[in-house]
Amino acid sequence: MDRFLHFCCTACCKRLASHFFGHCARKYASAFALLGLLVMLPTAWAQQPHSPLERYRKLEFPPTRENADKGWKDRVALEFDIINSADLPSLRAALKDKDPFVRSVAARALGILADKASADALAELVKADPEHMVRIRAVESLGFLRMKPKVIEQAKKDRNAGVQWSARMAASQLEKDTDYAALVRKAYAARIKREDMGAAKVGQPAPDFSAQTSDGAAFKLSNVLGKKPVVIYFAGLDV
């Protein structure tokens, strides 16, 4: 009898335990799954690639005179990415970044993207930013936006010659009907292959290329080569 009772009690306990733990497992399975997801999320976020603007901030070779021949392909590629990603909130915030190179590229991008909401902030940069390269990009963008003519006029008297030159260019845009920002956006949207960067070599025939002129017309080097003089002009301060 004792053995029989022991057997019954053991079987009953096993069934109760199985039922209890099975119920708990079903009840808390979703909670454990959620907990596992929360543990994995920081790792997933850490693996996400940085934004183009963040990568620009961490450039090994910022756009200084000393780095003219170093890392320029990375800078060009990132500027294409920054403009084509069109992350306006991040770009607006970057106008207050402590890094002048970040403020500069953000100012340029906002003008090209025709972000009129940033006009006041750009005007403040033109008037007060301590770095001339930031003031250059900011006044350039006011020209793209066709806004703040008084600020542009004031910039013609800036202590830096580069800002003065850019202000004159911006002022000339105010007098024309051409949407220069749209033309520049179109050029950036066409992108450029990294392997094509640096294809032109000193002392070698110029490689054929297609582009658009400042009035939006199509241009192809092979269509004019040998028919009329061709001059390559590198715009001042356009680095």
Image (cartoon, helix red, strand yellow):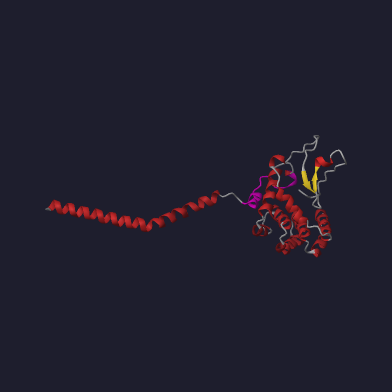
Q: Position of residue 172 (x, y in %)?
A: 84, 58
The answer to which image quadrant residue 113 occupies is bottom right
183 inside magenta stretch: no
> Would you place residue 107 above or below residue 150 in this image?
above
* Badge count: 0
169 and 103: which one is in front?
Answer: 169
214 and 67: which one is in front?
Answer: 214
Seen at 36% across and 58% down, the residue is 27
Outermost residue to the left:
1
Q: Position of residue 110 (x, y in %)?
A: 71, 57
Seen at 68% across and 48% down, the residue is 78
Magenta-colored span: 51-66
160 and 214: which one is in front?
Answer: 214
54 inside magenta stretch: yes
Left or right side of 130 for 157: right
Left or right side of 11 for 31: right
Q: Position of residue 229 (x, y in %)?
A: 87, 41
Seen at 76% across and 56% down, the residue is 181
